[in-house]
């Protein structure tokens, strides 16, 4: 029984050995895409955040701490 199990496990392990792990080039491409996505998100959110900060500033004018 143990011999059959060992052969089955060896067969299963040999099926997935054709693919290799990600290379440094692939990681660099993914990192580049993430950086581009962050820049696009920052550019898109800048007007929204600027308006929000201006609104908070207007709301806070004339208020004192504890009011």
Image (spheres, rainbow, N blue to C red):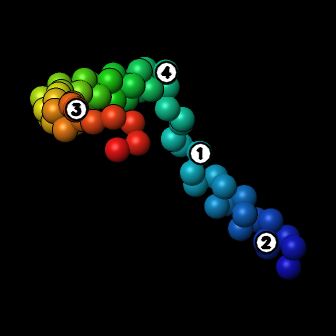
Classify 64 as above or below 23: below
- Can residue 53 be seen here? The reply is no
| Side (left or right) of 18 relative to 50 | right
Q: Which numbered disc, 2 or 1, marks the residue that appears first in the sequence?
A: 2
Residue denoted by label 4: 24
Question: Which is more foreground, mark 1 or mark 4?
Answer: 4
Name the quadrant of the N terminus: bottom right
Q: Which numbered disc, 2 or 3, marks the residue that appears first in the sequence?
A: 2
Cβ atoms under marks 3 and 1 closer than 8 Å:
no
Question: Which is more foreground, mark 4 or mark 2?
Answer: 4
In terms of secondary structure, where does tag 4 sit? helix
User: How far apart are the alpha carbons under marks 3 and 4?
Assistant: 55 Å
- In the figure, residue 30 lies in which quadrant? top left
Give the residue displayed 39% in from the left and 25% down from the top. Answer: 31
User: How far apart are the alpha carbons under marks 4 and 2?
Assistant: 37 Å
- Nearer-the-camera pick, 41 or 50: 50
Q: Which numbered disc, 3 or 1, marks the residue that appears first in the sequence?
A: 1
Question: Which is more foreground, mark 2 or mark 3?
Answer: 3
Classify 41 as above or below 15: above
Residue denoted by label 2: 5
- Can residue 39 be seen here? The reply is yes
In terms of secondary structure, where does tag 2 sit? helix
Residue denoted by label 1: 17
Residue 10 position within the rendered picture, expressed as x and y whole percent measured from the top left: 72, 58
Q: Which numbered disc, 3 or 4, marks the residue that appears first in the sequence?
A: 4
Classify 52 as above or below 36: below
Residue denoted by label 3: 62
User: How far apart are the alpha carbons under marks 2 and 3?
Assistant: 78 Å
């Amino acid at each position: 029984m143990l011999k059959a199990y060992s052969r089955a496990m060896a067969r299963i392990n040999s099926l997935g050995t054709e693919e290799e792990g990600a290379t440094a080039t692939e990681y660099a491409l993914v990192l580049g895409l993430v950086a581009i996505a962050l820049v696009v998100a920052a550019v898109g959110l800048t007007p929204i955040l600027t308006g929000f900060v201006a609104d908070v500033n207007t709301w806070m004018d004339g208020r004192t701490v504890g009011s």
